[in-house]
Amino acid sequence: MIPLSWYIIVGAALFSIGIYGALARRNALAILMAIELILNAVNLNLVAFWRYLTPNIVAGKVFVLVVFAVAASEVAVGLALIISIYRRRHTIAVEEIDMMKW
Amino acid sequence: MVAFLNDPFTWTGSLLRGWLEGLGLAPDLVTFLLQVLGALVLGTVMLLLTFILIWAERKIVARIQDRLGPNRVGPFGVFQTVADLLKLVTKELITPTGADIIPYNLAPLLAVMAVVGIWAVIPLAPTLIGAHINIGVLYVVAIGAIGTLGIMIAGMSSNNKYALLGAFRTVAMMVSYAVPMMIALLIPVLLSGSMDMATIVEAQSPIAFIILAPIAALIFFVSSLAEVGRAPFDLLEAESEIVAGFHIEYSGLKFGMFFVAEFLHAFTISALTATLFLAGWKGPWVELYPLLGLFYFIIKTSIVYFVVIWIRGSFPRIRIDQMNNLNWKLVTPLALAGLIVTAIGEKVAVEYGFNRPGIHVGANAFLFMLTLVMIRFNARAARSRVKGNSVNKAVAASSGSSQGS
Amino acid sequence: MLTLTQIVFLIVAAITLLAAIMVVTSRSMVHTALWLIMTLAGIAVFFVLLNAGFLAVVQVAVYIDAIAIMIIIVVMLTQRSMGSQDRQRSKTWWAAVIAALLLFGGLVLMFAQAPLLGAEAPTLTVGPEALIEELGLALVDVDRYIVPFEVASVLLLAAMVGSIIVAWPGRMSQEQEDES
């Protein structure tokens, strides 16, 4: 059928694309979306390893649920921060948000 | 012939399967083809059902408002919807300048997809269900919220401030009312022990869940009405409000798709309420003749749909701040309290062997009384606050006038 | 000869990776958000292929129906900040490309040395209902995974309270008075 290595390659590719997005984009929202890609790649890896190596132990899926919760809370707080920054500085380009207080 | 009348669905399925396998196809391919055929039939029947739904709504609302409704096109105006559809189809599809083409065209598809997709897991008869997945309730929640996504994309891609504002308000309302809807959906899951819709229907054997959990049924019904955007929660598309909301820039058949999606969504939530709380396809003699199950299901769904139309014709529209107040101050705490009370009641009834229906009915009645008392407190406090304001204003006016003169 | 499952896997993988690349290279923020939704849906299909149907539905319900809608709303609120004409790549984007490629190469090399990678999927001994039931029981079992479950709930509560306080517009009026 489908060997495990295919899933790992897709997960690694998504992870690398997410790392590129987090490092190379100027818009804070785009960086947040790239972080979502990274978290999804991690989830895919976890579920693939669970299915192929230990389908009887449920720890893999519990970890995935915790990663879901962490991703949701991180996006919520991140978006609140972005809105707050936009209100004060009227920009969300990360190069321009480089001073703590003026 | 008797086998056909007894169970037409399985009989037709095995007939088609035998015929297709006789053509020499592999069994897996036959299963796949039959599933595709079933999905096509279900989707088409649902979309064609909208003709009758729109006609019924117009006639019933007209009678509530003491007028006749459409009665010229065909006997009792039955073909009025066909005429409206022909008019919509022949209208020009105008795309506004500056609109994102692909999201603009994708949004009506998402709205219709979200509604038709829910019908895949509703058990229509003991042997007729689209996809028998064991997380049916969660699937309904997930697919239903894709409609919210379609509306947001529609408002976003229209290059129109009013569409954007309308889309924001719609999405805010739908996301707010999705919270009590999901909590109220958990209560039949608790009472029946499974998220599978077929199992929930089977667990309502002696007593339907509307008697065991009337508050949950009411909360689910009201929250679903708000999710769909039907009256009295239809401030998003009323002409006197924000100029028809998120679908201003849509014309012709794309607007028709939003229209169809809304009416079908109202029928779908009626079907969900009938399945989860009114025991779906259950009724007398349904084990012997599964075709009767479909009949009972249609009757129950039509009754709930009639109540939806009745509510539309009777209640005035709710303002958006009243709606937010209602949701976060009344419906969501009530849903949470109902969930806790049902869980405790279920545990007590199962562990200690008390009368299960008695405990649940008693707990619901207690919660209802508590809610009434708290609403009364709240109303008294609000009334005294308003009276205090007007007394203060009268005192200030009289003292000001006495000083001035 | 590829089996049907392998063809489906390749198609879904191609779509997901293409959508992910469009997420990180699209000029317009609205398009980025929509490509993100397609990536998330692709991952949900992967979960279904891996016999984790419950996680697929949770992925749709949490990511697409909640997180993606929040991101789209914030995109619309901050759309005036960076229009489509501004450049969307930072000045050192070539370093990011090199880093991503090195990371991908390193990960693939590292995993190629693991002996279990050619493994085929073991057949599941239990049906999907038992899988979900076991997951549910494990999450509330005192000896197993109740602590991560409760910690995740507290984390969500903290995030909810924190985001409301951070985005509260009350303090802005003070700064506007200070500036004027």
Image: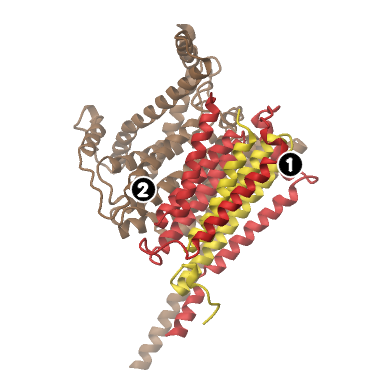
Which is more foreground, mark 1 or mark 2? Answer: 2
The answer to whether residue C139 is above or below residue C169 is: above
Tell me, yes or no, if residue B212 can be seen here: no
Tell me, yes or no, if residue C148 can be seen here: yes
Q: Residue B177: x, y in percent?
A: 49, 51
Please name the residue that numbered disc 2 is placed on: B103
| Chain in yellow on the image | A
Quadrant for the C terminus of chain C, please. bottom left
- Dot 1 falls on which chain? C
What is the three-letter code of the residue carrying label 2? Pro
Marks 1/2 same chain: no
Please name the residue that numbered disc 1 is placed on: C138
Q: How crowded is mark 2: few (under 14 residues within 10 Å), some or many (20 or more)?
A: many
| Chain in brown on the image | B
The residue depicted at 21 percent of the width and 28 percent of the height is: B74
- Dot 2 falls on which chain? B
The answer to whether residue C41 is above or below residue C161 is: above
Alpha carbons under labels 1 and 2: distance apart: 42 Å
Question: A44 or B56, which is in the foreground?
Answer: A44
| Chain in red on the image | C
The outermost residue toward the right is: C143
Left or right relative to B256: residue C55:
right
